[in-house]
Image (cartoon, grey):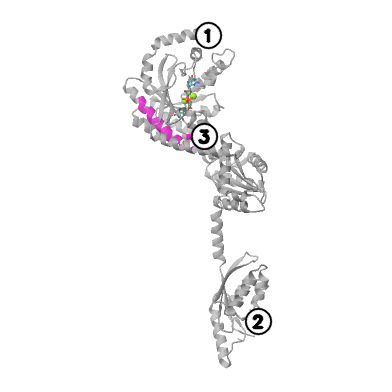
Amino acid sequence: MRRRGDRTELPLDVRRTGDDRTDDAALVAAVLDALPSPTLLLDADGTVLLANSGWTAAAGVLDDDRFRVGVGGNYFAMLRSVREDDSPRLLIDALRDLSAGGRAQVAADYDVSHPAGTRWYHLQATRVDRAGQIVVTHTDVTSRVRAERTSAWQARHDHLTGLPNRAHLHELIDAQLQRPDRASVAVLFLDVDGFKDVNDSLGHDVGDELLRQLATRLVAETRAQDTVGRLGGDEFVVLCADCDTEGAERLAGRFQRTFGKPFELAGRRTRLSTSIGIATAPSGRLEAVRSTDLVRDADLAMYAAKAAGRNRIRSFSPDLRTAAERRLLVAAELREAIDSGQLMLHYQPVMHLPTGEVTGVEALLRWQHPERGLLAPMEFIPLAEQSDLMAPLTRWVLASAVRQTAAWDAAGLTLVTGVNISATHFGTGTLVDDVTGALAEGGLAPERLVLELTETCVAEDAAGAAAQVAALRIRGVEVSIDDFGSGYSSLSKLVSIPAGVLKIDRSLVSGLDDRGSHAGAAVAAVVALGRTCGMRTLAEGVETAGQLAQAAALGCTFAQGFHIARPMPAEEVPAWMAARPRPASARSRLIAAAGQLAGSR
Ligand code: C2E
Ligand code: MG
Ligand code: MG
């Protein structure tokens, strides 16, 4: 063996003689050396005949004795020492076959573990002569493979939390369902309650930080064989292998407890709750279930959990699917109803108590369903809320109510019209434009419109609601708080809303002529509260003369209820108004009745 320059060379066992042989060897050696890739010339048994300088350099980089195979060493033995699996044997068989003329070339990719990280090589071998000598080149493709792996990883994971994303989750769930050794598979669908509030009030960066913290807590609660993934937004899915419904419910309970511990966000401590739906693949029939079905069922169960109130766990049952199908059907019908004139408004008169005059009406939505007849709002409004139909529905109500009020105006009937606004409309950000647009189009002064908001509008995003209400009141539109006293009332949030009228809920008003109840004291307190905040009050659901008289005696400004009039179609309103007793006599009867009530106490 002699060394020439910086390459290693073995006297070639080429079947030539004399000077020719030396020249050939030198030529081959020079050609190999010119190649940048680590390259070897091997004989049929894998003995290294020539190694170029690239090979020597690469062995130096790897700094591993296994790769320091020089001229005279055996390449096949080196391959066997590098990997313990079957791949060296297959590669060696292919190289022997190449050497024997059984194939034209061999190409293979293989990786080498290395303390500084795995390196990948693309191996390519060709036969150089009939004696079976072969040239093997090794191209380092580590950076390309790493880039490919990174982008493949990114395609399957959520960039924010590093958890499997929707597509990858489905692959993982399907893989679990296909495993014959799995007894059961459960999927938990989690949705954070009120996540939007955090995002809106503390900003998206804080929202992102919260999602990362949620992901960490979820992973900490699960076992190694479970998978936590993020579908997007605040929706997480947990795949729980060998987990029956009871096990999944226990896990869901642990998630709720860990979410109940405060999160540190932007220097504040925030507590969160979550709604969790569970779907379990029936044991013994796992392979018949698809991951899309399982996740959809868990989603439906989560939806039912959320509808039942926050912070709940619900397991899937088939009736949820029937209900969902029905919701879809009715939502499609409702969408159609808006365009095809099946919606109508009924108007309920509002009486001004100090004068006994009817000064306004409340517009109440009805759906003339082609098969089910006239539907009350509670039969379809909750569905419209869930199907993103509330804003188009309210735009229709606003336009119709404004047009009707302007038409009455033109006929000499001056009324202020109330329109109910749903909490979801505040989230769309279009409320102010929708209202001003309807007024401009219908040609009605803003003072003639009252928007009725419920306490939930205020509770969900107090700051956002207050800003929109303020913008409307600046334009001259009146705002009232509807159903006050029916739900949980947050007074601090309520006073932050610049409303002008407080509508006292029917549940309080109905007790007014029940002597044993405390309704009188409660209504008096609400009237006083209203006065303190500069608001007038309206007694809702007045059904008897006694309730009406009490409401007037307690200082309510307005009253509305079946005792005065039931809601009626627009065309009946003028005749009803004309048939009413003159306000002066109505007023004197009221005052007399109020006096009688006071005297009988
Ligand atoms: P609300 O805004 O509190 O409307 C008053 C409801 O009480 C009406 O029911 C009305 O018919 C009923 N009512 C009035 N006086 C009496 C009474 O003396 N006794 C009894 N028992 N009930 C009385 P309706 O029309 O079924 O509407 C129910 C709710 O549906 C409304 O409550 C309102 O929250 C909602 N709603 C109605 N129309 C719309 C609308 O256009 N948009 C939105 N977002 N909600 C609407
Ligand atoms: Mg109302
Ligand atoms: Mg009401």
Q: Is 330 on the left-hand or right-hand side of 191?
A: left
Asked if residue 40 can be seen in this view, the reply is: no
Q: Secondary structure at mark 3?
A: loop
Can residue 396 be found in the magenta stretch? yes
Are the residues tagged 1 and 3 within 8 Å (C-beta)?
no
Amino acid type at mark 2: Gly
133 shown above or below 334: below
Q: Nearer the viewer, residue 531 or 288?
A: 288
Q: Residues within 10 Å of mark 1 (few under 14, many from 20)?
A: few
Of mark 2 and mark 1, the one earlier in the sequence is 2
* Residue drawn at the location 33% of the way across and 25% of the way down: 407
304 shown above or below 547: below
Q: Is 339 on the left-hand or right-hand side of 236?
A: left
Distance (Cα) linking label 3 and label 2: 79 Å
Amino acid type at mark 1: Ala
Can residue 488 be found in the magenta stretch? no
Front: mark 3 or 2? 2
Q: Please report the bounds of the magenta region as a residue range.
A: 382-405
Q: Residues within 10 Å of mark 3 (few under 14, many from 20)?
A: some
Asked if residue 392 can be seen in this view, the reply is: yes
Q: Which residue is mark 3?
A: 461
Q: Is 240 on the left-hand or right-hand side of 533?
A: right
Distance (Cα) linking label 1 and label 3: 42 Å
Which is the main secondary structure of the residues drawn in magenta? helix
Of mark 1 and mark 3, the one earlier in the sequence is 3
Q: Which mark is residue 598?
A: 1
Q: Which residue is mark 2?
A: 72
97 shown above or below 145: below
x, y percentage for residue 241? 65, 49
Q: Secondary structure at mark 2?
A: loop
